[in-house]
Image (cartoon, helix red, strand yellow):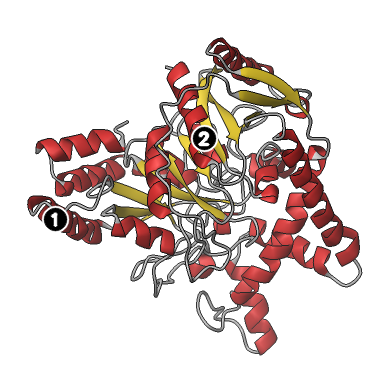
Amino acid sequence: MDTIQDLQEQLKSGKTTAEGLVQSALSKIDATKDLNAYISVLNERALARAKESDKRRAEGKTLGALDGIPVAVKDNMCLEGTRTTAASKILENFVAPYTATAIEKLEAAGAVIVGKTNMDEFAMGSSNETSYFGPVKNPLDSSRVPGGSSGGSAVAVASGTVPCALGSDTGGSIRQPAACTGVVGLKPTYGRVSRYGLLAYASSLDQIGPFGATVADCATLLSAICGIDPHDNTTSARPTEDFGAKLDAGIKGKVIGVPREYFGEGLDKDCKAAIEGMLKKMEAEGASLKEVSLPHISYAVSSYYIIATAEASSNLSRYDGVRYGYRSKDARKLFDLYAKSRSEGFGKEVQRRILLGSYVLSAGFYDAYYVQAQKVRRLITDDFNKAFESCDVIASPAMPGLPLKCGMNESDPMAVYLSDIYTVSLNLAGLPGVTVPCGMAGGLPVGLQWIGKPFMEADLLSVAAATESLNK
């Protein structure tokens, strides 16, 4: 896989042009269309942007490390004048009237958006099999899923069509597919990146983040897209950083927290061996391992699905067949318009989560479920805060095992939900996390998840870069 740095060197040397890079990306997308990683390919728009980049380069006015670089974005982010579907029938023909801030920042840095990637419908799923446009295939093993919900973005990078891509992460939807496909995936601290223009699933959990062939690529993308946004009052006022500044810092003297709850029952033995093997390598490089405890982590999945579905039931109420999106042709009365448009437009998994969310918010169950889940959320956050008093970063599996077999979303949905067991807690606590390959098991890559302190992405990425170096 080519990296951003590889492509920039080719551009600087005159070996290729931005237009050449984009044409190559479009050709690769066409050659790998059986993977179903893209919903929309923006040929004409991308080539026009590439020509603008070449003109800037000829005039000596390049915009930075991303100028002329092909990038893919998940199809739940608005891009003005292009189709934005969230992989749902209800938005199959919706054309965005404005551009998401994260994409706007990418384009301001000269990046060329070549396509909108496939995903689980409205980002609800961990397999990328709930998409109205069909499942994405894992390029490493077609019998297994690529992970979700940002599976299309992960596969776009893993298959070499683009060096980097944007996804969104509500409960592991960047980190999990990165583990499944052997690429790097980063979920920033909540508030690092604006959610303006991201179609909401669960607003207090959603966060946009990058996929890359390398840790350095993720750092470059994050540096471009983060920052305060007047359109999103949850964004942090912290200044934009160069997140690649500490990539060569190494791990000597770092204290790595190892939660006892993460390395016990439920973790595949081969995946555990790969992760522990990497931790031993890091210890040999001067890091120290310290056991920590996250006593309430067993409640994370339950708490997550209550909070996420509650917020989803509210956020998705706007898709009613009246203002935009799919409208049932059989509706004769107002109630029928709502009921038929939503039941015909939403897939099974989305309907399931809306129903569950409506239930936990109902008058008789709000205190018993939703309020309790929010209390557990605070306890989990406190657990992480206490653990970080004695360590710099926390090591964790990204998944309990290898990528799931295709079809389990229908045959065993509970197993699919539990595949998020190591990732959802970071969204509940608002923490940054990055998944990086650390070894192999059964011929497939194993992802190691690094968990960092709030807004300490630069330090987190330095540990991820060390992992990457030791994995070569």
- Name the quadrant containing residue 351: bottom right
Q: Pinpoint residue 195: horizontal percent, then vertical percent.
A: 52, 62
Q: Where is residue 167 in the image (x, y as percent from the top left)?
A: 48, 50
Find numbered disc 1 in the image and state the secondary structure of the residue it sits on.
helix
Say if mark 1 contacts mark 2, CB within 8 Å.
no
Q: Nearer the viewer, residue 184 or 116?
A: 184
Badge 1 or badge 2: first in the primary sequence: 1
Q: Give the image location of residue 231, x and y in percent.
A: 49, 71
Q: Nearer the viewer, mark 1 or mark 2?
A: 2
Give above or below for 54 relative to 77. Answer: above
Residue at 49%, 66% in the rendered image: 196
Q: Does residue 72 appear in the picture of this structure?
A: yes
**Of 371 and 180, the residue lying toward us:** 371
Report x, y in % for residue 8: 22, 39
Q: How crowded is mark 1: few (under 14 residues within 10 Å), some or many (20 or more)?
A: some
The number of numbered discs placed on residues in the rendered structure image is 2
* Residue 262 - label: none
| Residue positioned 50% across, 58% down in the render | 87
Q: From what the image shows, is residue 136 above or below residue 205?
A: above
Q: In this view, does 362 lie to the left or right of 407?
A: right
Q: In this view, does 98 lie to the left or right of 359?
A: left
Residue tagged 1? 56
Q: Residue furthest top?
A: 284
- Left or right: residue 276 versus residue 56 is right
Which residue bears the numbered disc 2?
A: 459
459 up-or-down from 312: above or below: above
Where disc 2 sits, the SS reads helix
Q: What residue type is labelled 2?
A: Asp
**Residue 37 seen in the figure:** no
CA distance separating discs 1 and 2: 34 Å
At x 22%, y 48%, the residue is: 22
